[in-house]
Image: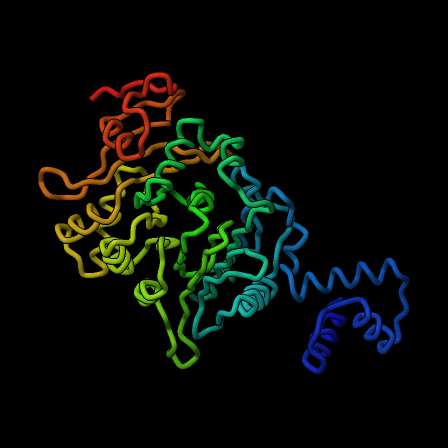
Amino acid sequence: MEELIDLVRDDLVRVPGPVDVPRIARLLREAGQVVGAAELLRTTSHLRDHLLGLGPLQELLTPTVTDILVNGDGSVWVDTGEGLERSDLALAPEQARELAVRLATVGGRRLDDAVPYVDAHLPDGARLHAVLPPLSTGATLLSLRLPARHGFDLDALSRAGTFGPLGREVLEAVVASRLAFVVSGGTGTGKSTVLAAMLARVPRHERIVIVEDAQELDVDHPHAVGLQSRHPNAEGAGAVDLSVLVRQCLRMRPDRIVLGECRGAEVRELLQALNTGHEGGCGTLHANTAADVPARLESLGALGGLDPRALASQAASALDVVIHLGRAGRVRRLEQVAVLHRGRDGELATTSALDLRGGEPVAGPAWDELASRLGLSASPAGRGSRRARR
């Protein structure tokens, strides 16, 4: 099989095109091999997986797998929604490196000794991250975040237990009221999924401009356009970072500006953009709790040259709501909705409006304020919630 793979690669260089049955049948004839129709189909599928798909990892793809990880010792772990489990598969060091380099190339990125790490979006929607030695202490490290086989809308997320009727009503009202918001949470809590589902409820006549480092958001909306950052080329030139793209999107007549993930100095440009009349902007942010969002924004603002006071002033004016997600086992759920504001000391703070971590919703101190802005009933009575103690 390895010899046949090399033959197909050489043939693709000479005659570009698909890896299909006629090509494989011709190469087998030229090599003096004769196989039956069933074996020809199986061989073609196997070669396509190795040359265009995930190669030796292809066999792990099932509708329930969300993540595939390759460690430095060659072990392969998968997450089917219930946490990581070790598979029976193992990759040799050269296999892992070859696969990572090929997938990076497919994603339009460079991965070699000069640029030993990569974050890329693959054509099938998967997100790739890979690190080569010596940055990795063992062999190549490879992480794949696989897209959902079927897109999740708010209906599907509700059925999956991400939120109940009250939580869904709040999310829909946040979008309809054009409040600016951030979706926060840890890794794998479904931030991008919930954000995409919320953006799908944006009115069809509005234009959404999405800025990402590596394309991940898949929004079911007829007028959503995306911008993706570009890494430097082999000469170290040509890089375009998120800060530049946020400024560019202002010239694209956006109704809503979306930053796929706030994780650097680009938060400065985002806050400035949202303070220029662009309502309903949003993004995702890594944070442990809703209360930790101000500190997280302050740390990112510092990268952009904003001191805490300046950041608080910009953020309190630009952002309205924090939607925090968590994960309990295989269930990703909405845990808290909070309001961003400046405290008495002038620093950025959050106040809980709705706590969904317990068995029933708990209305927080900021519920009346949020409900008023969203056009919801000021009283939580009859909505399955109770008042939080101050």
| Residue 86, x across and y down, in percent | 58, 44
**Colour mapping:** rainbow
Q: Quadrant of the N terminus?
A: bottom right
Between residue 62 and residue 32, name the one nearer to us. 62
| Residue 104, x across and y down, in percent | 53, 66
Q: Quadrant of the C terminus?
A: top left
Q: Is residue 364 above or below residue 182?
A: above
Q: Residue furthest left?
A: 345
| Residue 124, x across and y down, in percent | 59, 58
Residue 151 relative to residue 251: left or right: right
Which quadrant of the figure has residue 352? top left
**Could you tell me which residue is drawn at 68 percent across and 63 percent down?**
50
Q: In this figure, what is the number of numbered marks? A: 0
Q: Is residue 207 above or below residue 338?
A: below
Residue 271 relative to residue 175: left or right: left
**Could you tell me which residue is drawn at 69 percent across and 61 percent down?**
49
Between residue 70 and residue 287, name the one nearer to us. 287
Residue 16 relative to residue 222: left or right: right
| Residue 308, x across and y down, in percent | 15, 51
Which quadrant of the figure has residue 103? bottom right
**Could you tell me which residue is drawn at 15 percent across and 41 percent down?**
342
Q: Residue furthest front?
A: 205
**Could you tell me which residue is drawn at 63 percent across and 44 percent down?**
63
